[in-house]
Image: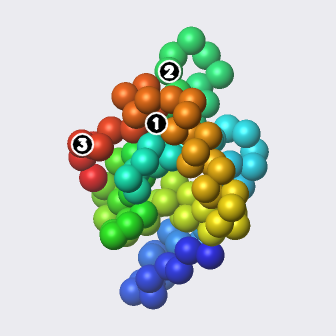
Amino acid sequence: MFTFPKPKTASDALRQAKVAERARTLFSDGSYYWYDCGNGFYGVAKKSFDVIPDTTYTVVLMPAVSCSCPDFREHLDFCKHTVALWDALEAMDEEEQIERIEREAASCELETTGCDRYAEF
């Protein structure tokens, strides 16, 4: 599980609770999905269910957590995308992670994934 920093205020604690709540079901409800872009970069995307492209955010978990979404850029600590991805990867065993990386590498090129290595964090 993602470890939140100790909240400094009641407002911080409330934000953590809301982020944790949304992150818990982010991928399971089918509206979001994630993919590995390689070299520690991940894409977390919200399905548009329309003719417009899916909204995609670039997430980095190591060496420091970052996301290109507006919430992360405002608070600079965590967001529902980083928490949900962290927990999803942690839930996978090592063999599953290797298989997923190999599948992603074989099925797509980095340029077509929507990951932006130069996203503003």
Residue found 70% across the figure and 67% down from its top = 93
* Residue 44 position within the rendered picture, expressed as x and y whole percent measured from the top left: 52, 44
Position of 69 with respect to 88 (left or right) is left
Front: mark 1 or 3: 3
Residue at the top extreme, as displayed: 51
Q: If you read the primary sequence from the N terminus, does the residue marked by circle 1 or circle 3 appear first?
A: 1
Q: Which residue is mark 1?
A: 56
Residue wearing tag 2? 53
Residue at 56%, 39% (x, y): give it.
Answer: 104
Measure the C-alpha gap from mark 1 to mark 2: 9 Å
Earlier-in-chain disc, 3 versus 2: 2
Q: Quadrant of residue 78?
A: bottom left
Residue 13 visible in the picture: no
Q: Is residue 25 visible?
A: yes
Q: Secondary structure at mark 3?
A: loop
User: Dot 1, crowdedness within 10 Å: few (<14), some or many (≥20)?
Assistant: many
Q: Which residue lies under the disc numbered 3?
A: 118
